[in-house]
Image: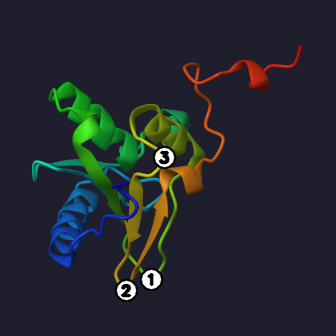
């Protein structure tokens, strides 16, 4: 069964939403005032959190999604066990991930992995394949993709 067709239970989503809210509260976002929390939900029940960490040199800013991925790797987690990715942003708008995060997520997760964006009033789900349909990969190039 693909991840896309497996329903995320409401209880699991609510737990991840709550944890993402907590992660957003820990964000270092003095410049954008746009705190974001991210949660990787593992099939084991484990959750790994991330928040955005900004810098006075704006280009050094790291998004919540990438913080969660890097933290999970540093903790020795198998990213193959991630069932879905949940983010939270305060307010009434759900946001999709930035381009840099889409590429990083595509490095580690299958294209059918659900990305669930939540806010204070709703949620929206995409698969990673929907978010980045032609992700760059050095591992998947085939002859038909190369002009001769
Ligand atoms: Zn990002």
Residue at the disc numbered 1: 92
Label 3 or label 1, whichever lies nearer to me, is: 3
SS under mark 3 = loop
CB-based contact (under 8 Å), mark 2 and mark 1? yes
Q: Residues within 10 Å of mark 2 (few under 14, many from 20)?
A: few
| CA distance for labels 3 and 1 | 27 Å
Look at 10% across and 53% down and name the residue there: 45
Location of the N terminus (image quadrant): bottom left
Between the residue at mark 2 and the residue at mark 1, the CA separation in whole angstroms equals 6 Å
Closest to the camera, between mark 2 and mark 3, is 3
In this rendering, position of residue 87 left or right of residue 46? right
Mark 3, residue position: 111
Query: Is residue 74 placed above or below 125 in the rendered structure?
Result: above
User: Going from the N terminus, do you reach mark 2 or mark 3 first?
Assistant: 3
- Give the Cα distance between marks 2 and 3: 27 Å
Answer with mark 3 or mark 1, whichever residue precedes in sequence. Answer: 1
Judging by the rendered image, the residue that carries numbered circle 2 is: 121
The residue most toward the bottom is 121
């Amino acid at each position: 069964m693909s991840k896309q067709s497996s329903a995320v239970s409401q209880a699991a989503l609510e737990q991840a939403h709550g944890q993402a809210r907590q992660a957003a509260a820990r964000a270092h976002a003095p410049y954008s005032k746009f705190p974001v929390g991210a949660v990787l939900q593992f099939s084991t029940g484990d959750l790994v959190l991330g928040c955005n960490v900004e810098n006075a040199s704006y280009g050094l800013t790291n998004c919540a999604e990438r913080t969660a991925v890097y933290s999970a790797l540093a903790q020795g987690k198998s990213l193959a066990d991630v069932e879905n990715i949940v983010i939270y942003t305060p307010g009434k708008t759900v946001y999709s991930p930035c381009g840099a995060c889409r590429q990083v997520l595509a490095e580690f997760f299958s294209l059918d992995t659900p990305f669930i964006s939540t806010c204070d009033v709703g949620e929206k789900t995409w698969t990673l394949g929907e978010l980045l349909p032609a992700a760059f990969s050095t591992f998947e190039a085939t002859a038909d993709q190369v002009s001769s």
